[in-house]
Image (spheres, rainbow, N blue to C red):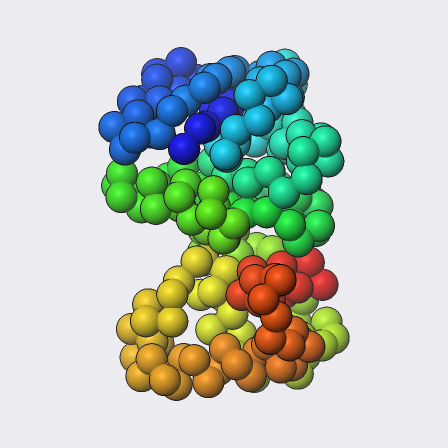
Amino acid sequence: MRVVLAEDLFLLRQGIIQLLEAYDCEVVAAVDNGTDLGTAIAEHRPDIAVVDVRLPPTFTTEGLQAALLARREQPGLPILVLSQHVEQMYARELLADGTGGIGYLLKDSVLDDGQFIDAVRRVAGGGTAMDPAVVAQLMTSHSRDEPLSALTAREREVLELMAEGCSNNAIAQRLTVTEGAAAKHISSIFSKLMLPPSTDSNRRVLAVLAYLNA
């Protein structure tokens, strides 16, 4: 797996490089600003970009803005945001096109290497890996959105766990229900969000994106 990394803190950047390489990832470029991030993605066309939100020179949203620009130029580019902050407007824009893997992890919530590498692999494979705190903030204003208002409280819980990247089995364990019950809730969600069976799209990802971007 070929990775472009954008992180301005030297020690953290080097630590992430070593962690990725320990799990057979090739870091083809590691940069500390948004301009170089865009250049590196265009040059290397990586399997995934791991991006901090706040990069020089203003330390506001340069990382996310560069990621958005790169994705417009390279549609479907998997992007994993790794930050201490939730930037709702840009996070929603990043999620909006519904193509390619997307992840958003808060640095303080990454507790071990397995959790981080699992997120990298999941996003590179076209899935989602959303920190629960990020999901909660992105969902706060959506309680009355259609067709999301058709979802039951339990279905919303299931969809939130789907957004975090949980499998059916993991959802069942978290909610203390059977895996069959979890599958039924997910099937109902697909139906209410008008996502019919298709071999051409990942309904799980589309359901999450519909929920976070309505």
Residue 1 appears in the picture as rendered? yes
Q: Quadrant of residue 62?
A: top right
Looking at the picture, does residue 81 appear above or below residue 29?
below
x then y, percent, for residue 20: 33, 29
For this view, does 40 lie left or right of residue 124? right
Q: Quadrant of residue 25?
A: top left
Q: Which of 132 and 182 is in front in this view?
A: 182
> What residue do we see at 53% from left, 56% from top?
135
> What residue do we see at 48% from left, 82% from top?
185
Q: Quadrant of residue 210?
A: bottom right
x then y, percent, for residue 195: 65, 74
Residue 141 appears in the picture as rendered? no
For this view, does 55 lie left or right of residue 144? left
x then y, percent, for residue 205: 56, 60
Looking at the picture, does residue 4 appear above or below residue 209?
above
**The N terminus, quarter of image:** top left
Q: Which of 187 and 208 is in front in this view?
A: 187
> What residue do we see at 56% from left, 31% from top?
53
x then y, percent, for residue 74: 67, 33
Looking at the picture, does residue 7 appear above or below residue 130?
above
